[in-house]
Image (spheres, helix red, strand yellow):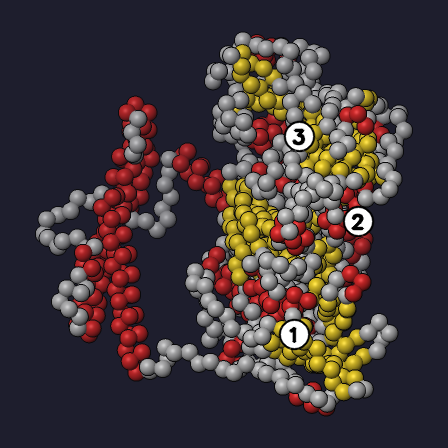
């Protein structure tokens, strides 16, 4: 098998396409191992600049190509010979087998990582070690190893199956000779410090023995210098250093505590209280609770220990508000949150005096934020026709947010329904390998250019998602602390870390309000490399997913391939990330990651450029004619073509391009970039940094703010921000039904699908029959249809398919499912309209012969919640690319 010229070991899906891309011939092919299904192979073919992959299985010693199970082959040679003949079902007969060159060609990239890798490979190939400040002795040792001794290690591994590189370890030991001497000197210093600490503390004679037990006995016998010996000595040195530091800290701490015996105690302050009033004038004495200035200083604030639960005792809070009625009448009022009694007191002024209303948290059905005015909150008391609604206007947005958080914290998480809307901040910034400035508050505040927030709207959002690229200049923990401190200065809240995920310089940080933290579960993370054919992490994506109440969220931060001419590589990057991100609960044979979450964000340095000359682009920027620039934006064009991010949404771009700026300026672009080799690249100012989102059709999402920051200028990219208000599925109804032991069999609801009609652009091979698989959280199990009983292949002269935006000359197949082919009694878990109207059906298109996943779409159940059957049209997408349209009709019956 290994002797076949067209077989290459461990070539991935993407690398196979890279190799085929080098062959300008239809029918070029190679055979590779399938990484998705171990023990099988894959036949990869090039045809009309597209690539088709067919899985090859082995049954009882014979080879079978999926989709062509009527014939088996005794060897791979026989299989290849068969498919070299025309009209055997492949997109094109096999012609030229691809023998991969050595070394495998990698895509050129602007990254320093790839340039360094190429330089290193070249140096090793030439067996020349450059003099990088090393001594001549060290250079000679390395040169000798790469000239001769490396072959000894190689032969030892091959012949003796050795698990060590003996010669290389000897080289490392010789190179670390000076380090070994320095460790001995440093251990001597630590020994002295340990003795000083012992004398000051005056402990028992053997109380500090543990400081010395880890050190080797001092003797005059020479120690053999090996790599293991140096590593052990480093480990001992590290442990000794830590022990001395800890012991000395305890010594000083004990001395401080002895001088200040009260410092270990805690001072408790009285909570702000409100006394009952009988006149409206006395209500003017009610003020919000205040804290000292020291409490707001992040330098004096200590972060709580995440591993130790703390009992938080909140002070009572009171606010002066304006009550707004539907008749535009305004009334002054005062609201108090009494945390000790767990109740809400409202003092409402009227002609008869002040009316005091006391309300328990369980009586508050919902608190709704106003998306346009952050100083307004709507409180709904009770439910149904007996409900009462009040709109309160607070003196500032921070007070409104503080009140909202206080009410949420009073609710019982097991029985109360939380607000069905939350605010999410999403930010992306290519840091350019530079450290961030001290002040980055304008970024999470959404202050800058574009659709920005009012500067008074400095409220605390529920979730913050920060995505950075080329951010390895600042350590992960330091960056998270910096973000938390910035949010504390803005909101006076200690935000909780949901998850952090880093891949080289690509990083995503998810933070949430303390009141939201207990509602988040099932946190997962994943990452995909796309640099240099999937081997390097300078390009790729990192993702975090979680469940908030009964709603799934996913955040993907990516850094895609650069340069204006690399649109196809960027599309390949997106598909590779979507295909290989292992997130979500569904099998990849049913759908991909882009269809598995109620709300999903994709952001980062997507690197899409403006296809326009630099002078014309600069003129459009100076005139702020962003609509004209947007028409030549590559991402906009690719979305219109259905090539990438089909059905993903983005708010209108009303801010200047964010790349490539002169560092230190927000209004000057550096359009010439020097590449390796002395060549200059022309970079038209472009919107490289973007934020896209996608939601289930049954759930709404609104982008309130979308723009760029103009005062963070350490990189040639500007940070981009977006604020989104999203729907959240509350699980309160389901929880109540479970507690009441409700039996859904008493009044079941069934989903019936009457017919379905698809218009498919193209498939990897000709297939006549397809199936549809229906998946939803409101169904117990996935339900699959029968294969379509009718359908046809059309040509370019056929008129456009009804309800489809795809031109007829791009449509290859049109399968049709009759009512007898489709499920007509899919039982819902709960029959209530309030539950069903927020559910969707995930419909996956698959081949009927081997169940190959071709694409999917979402259908909202609200379409079927009528007395008559209604149809719904959706785009079928595969890893973000549109592969067709699906029209489906049905209804819900009880």
Q: Which residue is mark 2?
A: 631
Q: Earlier in the sequence, mark 2 or mark 1?
A: 1
Residue appearing at x 62%, y 31% in the figure: 589
Q: Is residue 193 above or below residue 477?
A: below
The answer to whether residue 212 is left or right of residue 571 is: left
Residue appearing at x 37%, y 80% in the figure: 263
Q: Position of residue 355 (x, y in %)?
A: 74, 82
Label 2 CA crowd tier, 10 Å (few <14, some 14–19, many 20+): few
Q: Position of residue 619 (x, y in %)?
A: 78, 58
The answer to whether residue 262 of the structure is visible from this angle is yes
Mark carried by residue 853: 3
Label 3 CA crowd tier, 10 Å (few <14, some 14–19, many 20+): many
Tally of numbered tags: 3
Q: CA distance from mark 3 to mark 2?
A: 34 Å
Label 1 CA crowd tier, 10 Å (few <14, some 14–19, many 20+): many
Residue appearing at x 75%, y 40% in the figure: 749
Q: Which residue is mark 1?
A: 344
Q: CA distance from mark 2 to mark 1?
A: 53 Å
* Res 240 → quadrant: bottom left
């Amino acid at each position: 098998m290994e002797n076949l010229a067209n077989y290459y070991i461990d070539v991935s899906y993407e690398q196979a396409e890279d190799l085929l891309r080098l062959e300008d011939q239809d029918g070029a092919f190679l055979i590779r191992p399938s990484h998705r299904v171990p023990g099988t192979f894959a036949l990869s073919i090039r045809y009309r600049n597209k690539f088709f992959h067919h899985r090859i299985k082995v049954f009882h010693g014979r080879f079978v190509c999926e989709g062509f199970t009527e014939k088996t082959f005794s060897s791979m040679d026989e299989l290849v010979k068969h498919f070299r003949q025309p009209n055997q079902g492949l997109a094109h007969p096999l012609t030229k087998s691809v023998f991969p060159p050595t070394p495998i060609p990698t895509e050129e990239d602007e990254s320093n990582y790839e340039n360094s890798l190429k330089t290193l490979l070249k140096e090793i190939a030439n067996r020349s070690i450059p003099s990088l400040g090393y001594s001549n002795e060290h250079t000679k040792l390395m040169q000798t190893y790469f000239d001769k001794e490396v072959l000894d290690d190689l032969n030892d591994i091959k012949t003796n199956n050795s698990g060590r590189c003996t010669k290389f370890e000897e080289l490392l030991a010789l190179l670390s000779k000076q380090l070994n001497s320095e460790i001995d000197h440093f251990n001597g210093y630590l020994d002295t410090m340990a003795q000083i600490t012992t004398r000051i503390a005056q402990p028992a004679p053997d109380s500090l023995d543990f400081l010395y037990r880890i050190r080797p006995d001092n003797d005059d016998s020479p120690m053999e210098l090996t790599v293991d010996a140096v590593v052990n000595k480093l480990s001992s040195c590290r442990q000794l250093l830590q022990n001395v530091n800890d012991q000395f800290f305890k010594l000083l701490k004990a001395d401080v505590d002895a001088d200040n015996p009260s410092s270990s105690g805690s001072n408790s302050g009285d909570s702000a209280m409100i006394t009952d009033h009988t006149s409206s004038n006395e209500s003017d004495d009610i003020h919000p609770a205040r804290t000292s200035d020291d409490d707001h200083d992040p330098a004096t604030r200590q972060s709580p220990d995440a591993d130790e639960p703390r009992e938080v005792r909140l002070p009572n809070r009171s606010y002066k508000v304006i009550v707004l009625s539907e008749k535009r009448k305004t009334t002054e009022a005062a609201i108090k949150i009494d945390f000790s009694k767990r109740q809400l007191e409202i003092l409402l002024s009227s002609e008869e005096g002040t009316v005091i209303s006391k309300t328990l948290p369980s009586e508050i059905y919902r608190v709704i934020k106003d998306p346009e005015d952050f100083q307004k909150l709507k409180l709904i008391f009770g439910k149904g026709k007996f409900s009462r609604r009040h709109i309160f206007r607070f003196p500032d947005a921070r007070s409104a947010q503080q009140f909202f958080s206080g009410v949420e914290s009073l609710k019982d998480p097991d029985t109360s329904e939380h607000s069905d809307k939350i605010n999410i901040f999403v930010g992306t910034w290519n840091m350019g390998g530079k450290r961030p400035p001290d002040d980055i508050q304008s970024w999470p505040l959404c202050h800058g250019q574009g659709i920005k927030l009012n500067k008074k709207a400095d409220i605390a959002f529920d979730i913050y998602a920060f995505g950075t690229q080329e951010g390895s200049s600042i350590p992960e923990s330091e960056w998270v602390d910096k973000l938390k401190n910035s949010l504390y200065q803005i909101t006076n809240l200690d935000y909780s870390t949901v998850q952090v995920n880093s891949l080289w310089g690509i990083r995503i940080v998810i933070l949430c309000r303390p009141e939201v933290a207990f509602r988040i579960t099932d946190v997962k993370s994943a990452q995909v490399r796309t640099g240099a054919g999937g081997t390097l992490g300078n390009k790729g994506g990192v993702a975090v997913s979680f469940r908030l109440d009964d709603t799934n969220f996913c955040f993907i931060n990516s850094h895609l391939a650069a340069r204006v001419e690399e649109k196809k590589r960027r599309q390949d990057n997106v598909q590779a990330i979507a295909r290989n991100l292992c997130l979500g609960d569904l099998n990849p044979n049913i759908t991909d990651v882009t269809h598995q979450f109620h709300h999903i964000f994709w952001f980062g340095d997507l690197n899409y450029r403006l296809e326009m000359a630099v002078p014309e682009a600069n003129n459009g920027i100076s005139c702020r004619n962003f609509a004209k620039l947007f028409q030549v934006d590559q991402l906009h064009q690719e979305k219109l073509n259905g090539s990438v991010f089909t059905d993903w949404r983005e708010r209108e771009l009303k801010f200047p391009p964010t790349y490539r700026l002169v560092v230190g300026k927000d209004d000057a672009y550096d359009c010439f970039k020097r590449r390796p080799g002395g060549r200059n690249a022309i970079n038209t100012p472009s919107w490289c940094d973007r934020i896209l989102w996608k939601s289930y059709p049954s759930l709404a999402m609104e982008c309130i703010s979308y723009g760029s920051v103009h005062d963070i200028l350490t990189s040639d990219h500007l940070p981009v921000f977006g604020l989104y208000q999203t729907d959240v599925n509350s699980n309160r109804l389901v929880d109540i039904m479970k507690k009441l032991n409700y039996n859904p069999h008493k009044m079941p609801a069934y989903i019936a699908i009457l017919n379905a009609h698809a218009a498919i652009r193209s498939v990897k091979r000709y297939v006549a029959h397809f199936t549809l698989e229906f998946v939803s959280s409101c169904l117990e199990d996935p339900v699959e249809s029968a294969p379509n009983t009718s359908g046809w292949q059309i040509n370019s002269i056929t008129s456009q398919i009804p309800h489809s935006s795809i031109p007829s000359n791009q449509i290859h197949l049109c399968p049709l499912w009759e009512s007898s082919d489709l499920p007509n009694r899919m039982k819902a878990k709960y029959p209530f309209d309030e539950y069903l109207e927020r559910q969707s059906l995930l419909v996956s298109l698959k081949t009927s012969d081997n169940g190959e996943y071709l694409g999917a779409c979402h259908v909202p159940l609200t379409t079927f919640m009528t007395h008559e059957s209604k149809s719904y049209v959706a785009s079928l997408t595969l890893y973000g690319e549109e592969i067709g349209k699906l029209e489906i009709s049905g209804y819900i019956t009880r």
